[in-house]
Amino acid sequence: MANREALRELQTRLAGRLQAAGEGVSVSSWLAVEAAGQRYLMPLGQSGEIFAWPGVQAVPYTQPWFMGVANLRGTLVGVVDLAALLGQGGTRSEQALGETSLVAFNAALEINAALLVDRLSGLRGLDAFAASEPASPQAPAYFGATYIDSQGQRWQELNLQTLSQHPAFLGIGA
């Protein structure tokens, strides 16, 4: 229950900041999340609604990172374990899954998918970071810059639009 209340609070703050953006006030640029101990930034314009773990229906003969499909507000959505997709995932218990969240892709990207993340870390703007580094040449195409906050923590930007078109993401078949 507390998980749902925290989720509602985050969505209320997000809605307020989006409204402020329309009024010309400086707002956050990213949704900050954590997966397998790594920190990621998802552009707000590419991120969609956030959901508490709804449970999924497994789909046979798919990649290990494709968890299955879930019914999110009447729409069937493919659920991708972000950590596993990036090669960092492990097996989760049902209890651990109950503490996760799904971040849907923005409807404008025209892909019915959501990313499973371990933790929502709020909203971040450029002013939350002390430095940034460009993506390394070996990084996947959907990795943007790495931002470093004042505590020295590194946050990897994920371009969800590029990810949604990446062959590895689209190739869910095992």
Image (cartoon, rainbow, N blue to C red):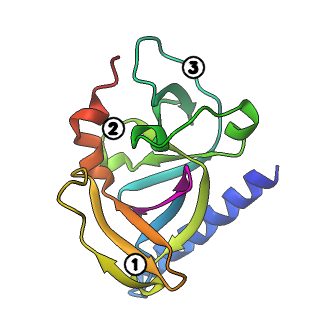
Earlier residue among tags 3 and 1: 1
Badge 1 marks a residue whose secondary structure is: helix
Image quadrant containing the C terminus: top left
Q: CA distance from mark 2 to mark 1?
A: 26 Å
Vertical side of 76 occupied by 42: above or below: below
Between label 2 and label 1, give the one nearer the viewer. Answer: 2
Q: Residue 40 colored magenta? A: yes
Tell me the quarter of the picture where residue 10 sits: bottom right
Residue occupying the far top of the picture: 60
- Would you name the residue on which mark 3 appears? 57
Image spot of residue 90 (x, y percent) = 56, 36
Q: Badges 3 and 1: C-beta atoms under 8 Å apart? A: no
Query: What is the span of residues highlighted in magenta in the rendered image?
Result: 34-43
Majority SS type along the magenta span: strand
Badge 2 marks a residue whose secondary structure is: loop
Earlier residue among tags 2 and 1: 1
Q: Residue at x 33, y 79 (%)?
A: 132
Vertical side of 159 occupied by 83: above or below: above
- Would you name the residue on which mark 2 appears? 111
Badge 1 crowding class, 10 Å Cα cut-off, few under 14, some 14 to 19, many 20 or more, is few
Q: CA distance from mark 3 to mark 1?
A: 38 Å
Q: CA distance from mark 3 to mark 2?
A: 18 Å
Q: Residue at x 60, y 31 (%)?
A: 91
Tell me the quarter of the picture where residue 157 sits: bottom left
- Would you name the residue on which mark 1 appears? 22
